[in-house]
Image (spheres, rainbow, N blue to C red):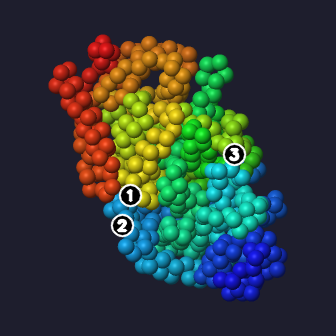
Amino acid sequence: MSTEKDGSSTGSPVMAILESRLDKANLSKLLALKNPAMHKFVADALELCRPDSVFVCTDSAEDVAYIRDQSVARGEEAPLATRGHTIHFDGQSDLARDPGSTKYLVPRGVVFSNKLNHEPKEDGLSYVRDLLTGAMAGKQALVRFFCLGPTNSSFAIPCVQVTDSFYVAHSEDLLYRRGYEEFKRLGGSSKGFFKFLHSAGELEHNISKNDHKRAIRIDLEDSVVYSVNTQYAGNTVGLKKLALRLAINKASREGWLAEHMLLMGVHGPKDRVTYLAGAFPSACGKTSTAMIPGETIIGDDLAYLRLVGGTCRAANVEAGIFGIIRDVNAAADPVIWKVLTEPGEVIFSNVLVKDGTPYWEGDGREVPESGTNYAGQWRKGMKDAEGKPLPHSHANSRYTIALRSLANLDAEYDNPEGVPVSGVIYGGRDSDTCPPVCESFDWAHGVMTMGASLESETTAAIIGKTGVRRFDLMSNIDFLSMPLGRYIQKHLSFGGKASPAPRIFSVNYFLRGSDGKYLTGMLDKKVWVHWMERRVHGEAEAIRTPIGLIPRYEDVASLYKELLGKEISRELYVQLFSIRCGKLIEKIDRIEKIYRSEIDVPDVLYKTLADQRQRLVSLQKEVGDVVSPEVLAARR
Ligand code: SPV
Ligand code: MN
């Protein structure tokens, strides 16, 4: 492509395409950004998808309002009774992320992990480009610019999104920082930007008709993600999980970390704010941890971690929440409840609507007799194909809001330098193995036995059976774009360069008693994060166990009292924090087996797991299969 010195594409084939596809006003908005590589991407997308018209969205309030209004005018969203609230429905089989249809495009000669869905680049490209050919006929293409992370910051990654879905473009407006001015500021030097091309495909009643031909293809070489025949945000909103896959790869090349993590400020004694980052698989308590009453939120889903002068600092990549709505109610989450029930911009998806009011499972209200949901008309007593009661709202139904509408937003949330990270949390959905909280011996021990050994029972956030135990290293297995072993090695070296490295903790909110009931309550996580906060500042002791450091009864009891006004019995504490040697050994065996079939796994991982197994085996022989924390405390 020939480009002029000023960064425009005058006289080139790219320019010819843009001139033929865009009207004057939109062309001039696009060309005000002097970025030939971006022009080339947009031209290719338009030539491939052949929309009837194109709208280039700047950061102006007027342009953004056009997207929001058109989403309603075209029926992709419908207004609800409360001002600013809308409902969007995805198709009946398009209600969650679809790992099976998501593949990396691997160039010839490159060895990729057999744990990650991939195919030869040429095959995958031609498959997805075929599906996208002419996919925007009869529609308008939207070209939007955003920024992952705060603008004008070392965390920032500019992004361009081309989509024919007003719902996707509107969601992105709530979820991300605007980036048109950032592209303008960077001019041709905005290298390494991410590109996303999405089409919902042919529609029937605004639902993707061909969702059986859903395809998401990730081109790591060219930093492009293609997505077609789907609307569910996890498959379509470029800057969310599509970008995470590109970012993990980029981060590994550049020595930082792109993580599926919340970021929060824990408010400790003497007005101290301590920042923690936390990785949890989808629907396992990530948002509710970030939203713990009395603490402040920076982000609930995606964080970039960088070393700045030896300190680990992190920024929220996003500016909004695409959160699970199930069990959000006035008691459990008063801050989100307020946003969801008062005027302001909210997109609800896949909930039940009755007379303009959205309803969902666990909202604490009477379920209406009937209404409209993702499957059409719903009535109480309806059964699914297996004869089970059909829930009024889908288990993965969600709300989309901007963080700025939250009363508990942390003051530092937009700091271009990020915030210092004192601790990293790894949590999974685990009924019977790990204690509610445990601190690793050091960074490397935490990376390998907590992050890289994470397992979690599956949830409705991905298509497939729920409740099945699944390996999910760092809660990033669905987004990993490089061999597992190399990713672990990157974590080890990152922490090795930090002084001090953040502490690493594991949590488990999902331990169950023999009656199948959860042993801890929704708000008990406040106690665990405050114990971490005290540990960071050297203000709480710990009991050494074969798997790491756990809290003493005295500290747990005083934190329950101080933070929740509750008593916790010694019996419950012992039940929660007993070391289940047999279960923990089985877990190590499962994890080791997974890594044995992978490439480039650092030897230290096997050694660390073997040492931990040995400690557990000795304890089991000496004391028994389930060992009380009080026995361990007495052994010191
Ligand atoms: C998750 O499933 O982890 C989410 C929602 O945060 S999605 O956009 O589907 O990824
Ligand atoms: Mn997520």
Label 1: few (<14), some or many (≥20) within 10 Å? some
On the image, numbered disc 1 is attached to which residue?
Answer: 483
Q: Residues within 10 Å of mark 2 (few under 14, many from 20)?
A: few
Res. 189 image quadrant? bottom right
Name the residue: 67% across, 57% down: 147
Sequence-first tag of 2 and 3? 2
Secondary element at tag 1: loop
The residue under the point 57% across, 75% down is 201
* Residue 214: % across, % down: 48, 70
Please tell me whether mark 2 sits on a helix, a strand or a loop.
Answer: loop
What is the C-alpha distance between the residues marked 2 and 1?
9 Å
Pinpoint residue 564: horizontal percent, then vertical percent. Answer: 55, 20
Quarter of the image with the N terminus in it = bottom right
Measured in 3D between alpha carbons, the distance from the residue under mark 3 to the one under mark 1, in whole angstroms, is 31 Å
The residue where tag 3 is placed is 416
Residue 27, given in percent of the width and then of the height, sits at 78, 77
Please give the name of the residue rendered at 67% of the width and 22% of the height, measured from the top-left corner. 271
Residue 319 appears left or right of 552: right
**Within 10 angstroms of label 3, few (less than 14), some, or many (20 or more) residues?**
some
> Spatial distance from mark 2 to mark 3, Cα to Cα?
36 Å
State which tag comes first along the sequence, 2 or 1.
Answer: 2
**In this image, 532 relative to 63: left or right?**
left
Residue with the mark numbered 2: 111
- Quadrant where the image shows the C terminus: top left
Question: The residue under label 3 is which amino acid type?
Answer: Pro
Number of numbered markers: 3
| Picture disc at residue 535 | none
